[in-house]
Image: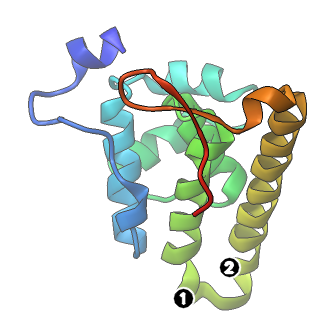
Amino acid sequence: MARRATRAPYYVHKAPVPDLISTEADLSRDLRRQHVWAGYPTPGEMERMSGTGELPGSTIRRIIKGEILPVDPQQTIAFLKACFVVQPADLEPWLSAATRAHAHIGAGNNKWAKAHRELLARIETIRQEVEAATPPRLRNVTHDSEGHEGEKTAA
């Protein structure tokens, strides 16, 4: 986080909100904003962080310039991971946004919707694993804003 504080411009006050993305232009703009929020990692740094062969530096440069969008969900995820969006729960809104932005494509949109469904299933699996690993006596315990324990109430 220190890198963002030292390298991000003064006007960057908060991370982009992918829930507001509805077009390809919105997606391109917010991917670039996420890059700024991450502290402007260089294309070389991003290529290393995304994994060998996942996202070439030339593609990263073109995404950062706003010339292109990632061509598939894997490139989108690789770009976001290189911008420090790594947890499945944090990636989910971005894939949902990409699915909305590519909705006009039709049949080609299936790869975006499929990747989003797979990520949602992965998040649910992780949630179930955490719940199974939680001792029963702690499953209904909540904490208020002051750290006091209480029981969950039915909604």
Residue denoted by label 2 = 109
Q: Residues within 10 Å of mark 1 (few under 14, many from 20)?
A: few
Q: CA distance from mark 2 to mark 1?
A: 8 Å
Which amino acid does the dot numbered 2 rest on? Asn
Q: Position of residue 94 (x, y in %)?
A: 53, 55
Q: For the residue labelled by badge 2, is the local secondary structure a helix, a strand or a loop?
A: helix
Q: Is residue 66 visible?
A: no
- In the image, 128 versus 99, the foreground residue is 128
- Sequence-wise, the earlier of marks 2 and 1 is 1
- In the image, 33 versus 20, the foreground residue is 20
Tell me if residue 19 comes above or below residue 153 in the rendering.
below
Q: Position of residue 45 (x, y in %)?
A: 52, 18
Residue denoted by label 1 = 104
Report if the CB atoms under discs 2 and 1 are less than 8 Å apart.
yes
Tell me if residue 113 comes above or below residue 119 in the rendering.
below
Q: Position of residue 28 (x, y in %)?
A: 39, 58
Which amino acid does the dot numbered 1 rest on? His
Q: For the residue labelled by badge 1, is the local secondary structure a helix, a strand or a loop?
A: helix
Tell me if residue 54 comes above or below residue 98 in the rendering.
above
On residue 28, which mark appears? none
Residue 51 sits in which quadrant? top right
